[in-house]
Amino acid sequence: MQWPSAPTPHGERGIGTLRREALDHGLTWNETRARRVFDEYARHCNGHRPRQARGRLSPFAERWPAPVTYLSTTRLLRSRVLGGLISEYRYVV
């Protein structure tokens, strides 16, 4: 089996995004810590982060979320990911 001479553009973009969003803001002392950061980042990306190719849905979303009609009666809930480096927001009715 022969390996490709250069990484694919998709791989390069994914590695760059992971580095900028997760690894550039803290120290990773060992493999255990790195795996924890990668796992939490993967849960965030696959469970919450929208994708343009899926019509702005996250990869694991089955359908569009219910539309929020009365903004004055709803609250916005903030969840911190990776120790506060990334914030996720959602409406709570």
Image (cartoon, grey):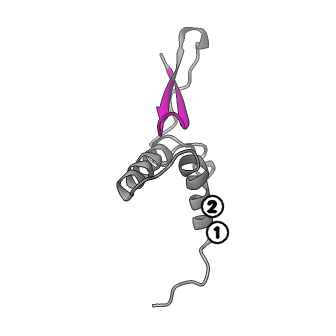
Disc 1 marks which residue? 9
For label 2, the SS is helix
In percent of the image, x 59 and y 74: which residue is there? 7
Decide which of 4, 75 is in the foreground and name it. Answer: 4
Q: Position of residue 65 (x, y in %)?
A: 50, 32
Q: CA distance from mark 1 to mark 2?
A: 6 Å
Image location (x, y in percent) of residue 36: 38, 49
Q: Dot 2 surroundings within 10 Å: few (below 14), some, or many (20 or more)?
A: few
**Magenta residues (range):** 78-91
Q: Most extreme residue toward the bottom, as rendered? A: 1
Q: Residue furthest top?
A: 73
Name the residue located 49 percent from the left edge and 31 percent from the top edge.
80
Q: Is residue 79 left or right of residue 69?
A: left
Q: Position of residue 55 (x, y in %)?
A: 60, 45
Look at the magenta stretch and give its main secondary structure: strand
Compared with 93, 46 (above or below) is below
* On-image quarter of the N terminus: bottom left
- The amino acid type, in three-letter code, at marker 2 is Arg
Vertical position of residue 22 compared to residue 78: above or below:
below
Magenta stretch contains residue 82 = yes
Residue underneath mark 2: 13
Q: Determine whether 62 is above or below 5 in the image.
A: above
Q: Nearer the viewer, residue 87 or 27?
A: 27
Q: Residue pushed farthest left?
A: 32
Residue type of the residue flagged with mark 1: Pro
Q: Nearer the viewer, residue 68 or 14?
A: 14
Q: Circle 1 — which element?
A: helix
The disc at residue 46 is none
